[in-house]
Structures are given as structure tokens and as C-alpha cells.
Image: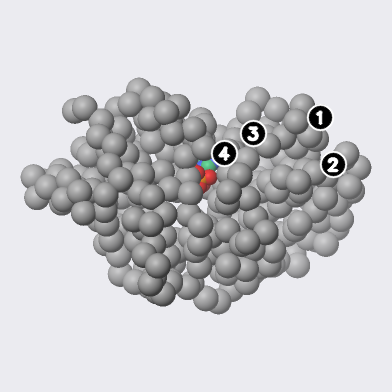
Amino acid sequence: MLMKTVQSIVDTRLLCRLQRYQGNNVGLVPTMGFLHEGHIRLVRQARRDNDFLVVSIFVNPTQFSPSEDFSTYPRNFEQDQSLLADEGVDLIFCPSTEEMYSSENSTFVEVTGQLTTNLCAISRPHFFCGVASVVAKLFNIIDPHRAYFGQKDAQQLAVIKRMVRDLNFDIEIVSVPIVRDDDGLAKSSRNAYLNPDQRKSSTVLFRALQHAEMLIIDGERNSGRILAEMEKVIQATEYARIDYIDIVCTNSFESQEYINGEVLIAVAVWIADTRLIDNIQIDLSNLTS
Ligand code: AMP
């Protein structure tokens, strides 16, 4: 099937609905574009699982605060289009801001409680409401059977899963592992902001996470001591400034004083003016020591 590129909500809804009526499974990969191998991993998995594959490209203004990088967020639509055509995508949904948000838009989806209390919610208080709202809109427009999200944005993934459950969306949320560069840096559209020296410093996120993992493998269970060690690693790195580091329960996202069962170790670090996030999950029952 030849890939279609559609800006209109009405046309996208019609095309997706037609596929559904024909008995086809519809998959959705929501993105903000400037695609990299992380996105492509989601697209490939979705291509394997579904008959009709939609990728949305929309830099969503409601998830950026006025001081953030909405206007400078990297964009390269032609390159995205060519990458997605190579992956056999059926439809790119790329609405304008005006198409998605009328000037009278006043309805938002807010996931409340522990999930949106710590980590990214602290420094980006409007972020998850913006994300949940735009994803709910995409779900209503495309009505996919499955939607794909990266584990790199672990808190976002948890928020979306909760929204789907609470609002009874009949959609399977598929989570996809983090794709990294060879030196461990998680792929991100924002890596494009880094100059060569900053790019070298940016490996500190994964190095700090690996250091934490080693301490846990060696038997450390006290989160405070692990976080202090991570802090040292990050503070010793040029350009790096901690936004947060935390060890939380993978289900509740509550900070854990002691490591027990499954935890998520999550970091957000400024490398000069670029804020990067990363995480690893550790399941004590899978550790050998
Ligand atoms: P974004 O365009 O940054 O909003 O990302 C769109 C989707 O791609 C989200 O579900 C992200 O979690 C996912 N994603 C971004 N980077 C990566 C990565 N390095 N590995 C896996 N998934 C990713």
C-alpha cells in the first residue's frame, strides 16, 4: 500500500475507520517527529503486529511550558516521511496545531495521584496533562487496536496505561525497550542540541544508571547511598546538572527507601541547556548475586 500523508482529522478518522470495518487491525505510533532509531524500533514492532499502521507526527504545544523548547524543537518532515515510507508505514497523521486545538479548546485529561507526583512532574508540572490530553485525542481520532510507547519515557508510559484503564479505552498499550547509541546514550530527538563536548558529557546518564546497577548487584539495598553515589558521578561531569535522580517502585512510582522487588532508577540531567532523561528497571529476582 502506498503511504498516505494526511493533515485532516476527518480524513484520518475515515481512513482508519474503513480499515477497521474491513476487519484490519490498526496500530498507532505517536511521535513528535525528528525520527531516530528509537522511534523506528516502535514502528517496526507495530508494523509486525498490525495490518494498518499509522504514525502520528505532532509537536504538541500543550506539553511544553512557555519557558521550554516548543518553538526550537527539531523538525525535519521530509526526512521523517522518507524513513517511514522505508518502514512500510500506511499513514502519517501530521495535523497542524490549529487542526488539533481550536481556539476554544478547554478540555484536558489529567491523571492524578502518585504517578504524576514525582520525577518529571516536579520540574514539568503541566507535561503529563498535555501528554495525556493529546494521546486521548489521537486515540479518539485513530481508534487503534494497539498503540506503541517507549520505555525511555517510563513515567509517560505509566500515565498512558493508567489513562487507558481509567477512561476505558479499548486499546492495547505496547511498551518497547530503550534504544541507545553505542556509548549508552538513549536516542532522543533532543540529542541534536548537543555540541561535541556536551555529547561526550551526555553519556553520564547511562553511566550513573550502570553504576547504580553495579552497586545493587554487589548487594547495596539502601536507595539513599546509591543515589549519593550516582550524584557524585554526575557532579564530576562537565556541563551536567541534576534535575532529579530517584529510585521508585515500577508500579506505583513511589520513591523507595530500600530496594525490594522491582524498581525503576530514573534520572533527568541538564547537559548545559539540554534536559535529557533515562532510566533502567531492576528486578531483584533476576539478579544472580
Ligand atoms: P517523542 O517523539 O520523543 O515524543 O517519542 C515518541 C515515542 O518514541 C515515545 O513513546 C518515546 O518513548 C519513544 N522513544 C523515544 N526515544 C526512544 C528510545 N531511545 N528508545 C525507545 N523508544 C523511544
Figure check: 156 above or below 121:
above
Location of residue 171 by image quarter: bottom left
The kind of residue on which mark 1 rests is Asp
- Quarter of the image with the N terminus is top left
**What amino acid is found at the position of numbered circle 4 in the picture?**
Pro
- Asked whether the residues under the numbered discs 1 and 2 touch, taking CB atoms below 8 Å apart as contact, a structural biologist would say yes
Please give the name of the residue rendered at 78% of the width and 60% of the height, measured from the top-left corner: 223
Residue picked out by circle 1: 197
Q: Earlier in the sequence, mark 1 or mark 2?
A: 1
For label 3, the SS is helix
Q: Secondary structure at mark 2?
A: loop
Mark 4 or mark 2, whichever is nearer to me: 4
Where is residue 226 shown, x and y percent of the image?
81, 54
Disc on the earlier residue, 1 or 4 = 4
Which residue is identified by label 4?
A: 74
Which residue was labeled with disc 2?
239
Establish whether ligand 1 lies closer than 8 Å to the Cβ of label 3: no
- Determine whether the residue tagged by mark 1 lies in a helix, strand or loop: helix
Name which residue type carries label 2: Tyr
